[in-house]
């Protein structure tokens, strides 16, 4: 109804199965609620996939103007050789590395930040300060992220700190030993693929009343009748 007019949502996701989980949900929302404003922050290879499917996407480079350009380059360029990816624009990689390192230094001090990056690489990144600033600029009413670490986890934590409701879309089954289960901060709502996914999340300490079994749109293509036809043809040929 009119009370929902102009809702603002922010989705944060990286590539592979995570962007595949998110894009069908955005497409469905755009059809159901054409007056809602949806921002998509698509990280690493997700940006390529979002654009391929006709979605506008934000990245780290869209916020690089908050930083001194030469400083970002000085920090990021020495690390490019080990982090390049053919589907990721180099300017985005520079912004991603530079901003995450700046956030790490702001939180830990320069020496400890460098030591931690040397030990952990990108696993050291946890840009809550940066994501808080992103949320303050974009002003979403709900933040939706996947269960990836780093930027997505930081987005959910920043949302909580700002009092913004949050949803975490969990991609698979969250088996024992999944690093996701070690988190102490949980989104206001979590979606999971099946009852097994829910049971694993509950066993891992996630409050049961926050978990919603929704299935995963990343696997919707499995229901395409074309698969059955292809399989029948292959069986015939064999």
Image: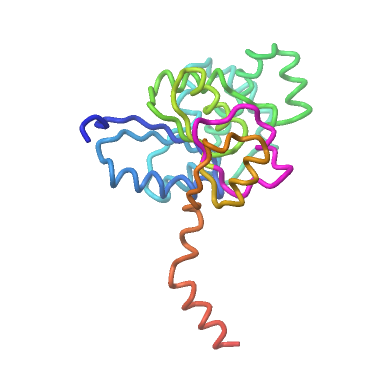
Is 54 above or below relative to 70?
A: below
Q: Nearer the viewer, residue 32 or 72?
A: 32
Q: Nearer the viewer, residue 228 or 209?
A: 209
Q: Position of residue 71 (x, y in %)?
A: 59, 17
Colour scheme shown: rainbow
Q: Residue furthest left?
A: 2
135 vs 102, left or right, is left
The range drawn in magenta is 170-190
Residue at the image position 60 percent from the left and 18 percent from the top: 103
185 vs 37, left or right, is right
When asked about the image quadrant of residue 39, the answer is: top left
Is 174 above or below relative to 165?
A: below
In the rendered image, the quadrant that contains the N terminus is: top left
Residue at the image position 25 percent from the left and 36 percent from the top: 35
Q: Position of residue 11 (x, y in %)?
A: 44, 35
Q: Position of residue 18 (x, y in %)?
A: 53, 45
50 vs 6, left or right, is right
Is 112 above or below relative to 166?
A: above
């Amino acid at each position: 109804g009119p009370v929902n007019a102009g809702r603002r949502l922010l989705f944060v996701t990286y590539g592979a199965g995570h962007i595949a989980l998110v894009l069908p949900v955005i497409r469905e929302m755009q059809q159901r609620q054409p007056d809602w404003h949806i921002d998509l922050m698509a990280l690493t290879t997700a940006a390529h996939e979002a654009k391929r499917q006709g979605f506008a996407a934000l990245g780290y480079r869209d916020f690089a103007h908050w930083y001194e350009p030469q400083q970002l380059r000085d920090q990021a360029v020495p690390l490019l050789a080990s982090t390049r990816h053919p589907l990721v624009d180099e300017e985005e990689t520079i912004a991603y590395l530079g901003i995450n390192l700046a956030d790490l230094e702001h939180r830990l001090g320069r020496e400890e930040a460098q030591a931690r990056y040397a030990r952990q690489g990108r696993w050291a990144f946890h840009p809550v300060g940066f994501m808080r600033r992103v949320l303050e600029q974009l002003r979403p009413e709900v933040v939706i992220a996947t269960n990836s670490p780093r930027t997505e986890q930081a987005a959910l934590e920043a949302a909580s700190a700002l009092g913004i409701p949050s949803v975490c879309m969990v991609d698979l089954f969250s088996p024992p030993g999944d690093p996701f289960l070690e988190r102490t901060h949980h989104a206001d709502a979590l979606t999971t693929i099946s009852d097994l996914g829910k049971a694993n999340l509950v066993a891992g300490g996630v409050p049961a009343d926050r978990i919603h079994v929704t299935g995963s749109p990343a696997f919707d293509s499995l229901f395409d009748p074309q698969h059955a036809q292809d399989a029948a043809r292959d069986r015939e040929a064999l």
